[in-house]
Image (cartoon, rainbow, N blue to C red):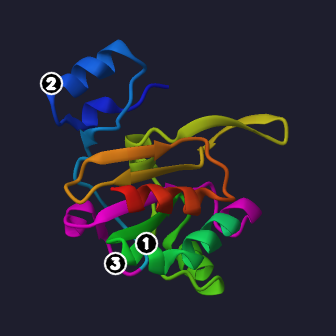
Amino acid sequence: MNHVISTFTSTSASTSAAMAATQPSIVGLAVPEFTAPATGGDFMLSAHLGHSVVLYFYPKDNTPGCTTQAQQFRDLHAEFIKAGCVVFGVSRDSLKSHETFKVKFGLPFELISDIEGTVCRMFDVVKNKMLYGKKVLGIERSTFLIDATGVLRHEWRATKADGNAATVLDTVMKL
């Protein structure tokens, strides 16, 4: 599956030329406006202009890896805020599941519910995975850093849950 580049807009001609010469990447492209249901009310990307935004996509609430990743983003949350960055988790779980997960682990950031997979497809994180010997479509754990102007600055695809938050924070501090 190719990245859904057509939904992103190039910030320069050189970015487009570089993309054509290599494997498609959405880094350096403006992230299109989107709205999605989230704990705490609907998420709108444009509401966060002026701040960096981390969107971390994870497969499922209350699973071991996803819980580890959420807890690490929780534990570093104050550092993200100090750096002018807001964090949002994204999965295809319901708002009810997200609310329970958020309360259970004391998550200080909001979780986006993408039941239909619209945001997941925009960021091309829905992949074929093996689950108990069967091929299924699921979210590939991935994290995206959007700068204060709405341009995607970094992506971590097929990342491990453990350590992802610290790696992302290190990059945020360098923006």
Would you say residue 46 sits in the magenta stretch?
yes
Number of residues whose C-alpha sits closer than 10 Å to that of mark 3, classed few (under 14), some (14–19) or many (20 or more): few
Badge 2 amino acid: Ala
First in sequence: mark 3 or mark 2?
A: 2
Asked if residue 32 is positioned above or below residue 60 in the image, the reply reads above
Badge 3 amino acid: Gly
Residue placed under numbered mark 3 in the picture: 41
SS type, badge 3:
loop
Please provide the residue range marked out in magenta: 40-66
Asked if residue 68 is positioned above or below residue 134 in the image, the reply reads below
Q: Quadrant of residue 12?
A: top left
Q: Are marks 1 and 2 in contact (CB under 8 Å)?
A: no
Compared across the picture, whether 74 is left or right of 6 comes to: right
Percent position (x, y) of residue 73?
56, 70
Q: Residue furthest front?
A: 174
At a point 43% along the width and 20% down the height, the residue shown is: 23
First in sequence: mark 3 or mark 1?
A: 3
Percent position (x, y) of residue 114?
45, 58
Residue placed under numbered mark 1 in the picture: 80
Residue placed under numbered mark 2 in the picture: 13
Badge 1 amino acid: Phe
Mark-to-mark CA distance, 3 and 1: 21 Å
First in sequence: mark 1 or mark 2?
A: 2
Q: Quadrant of residue 75?
A: bottom right
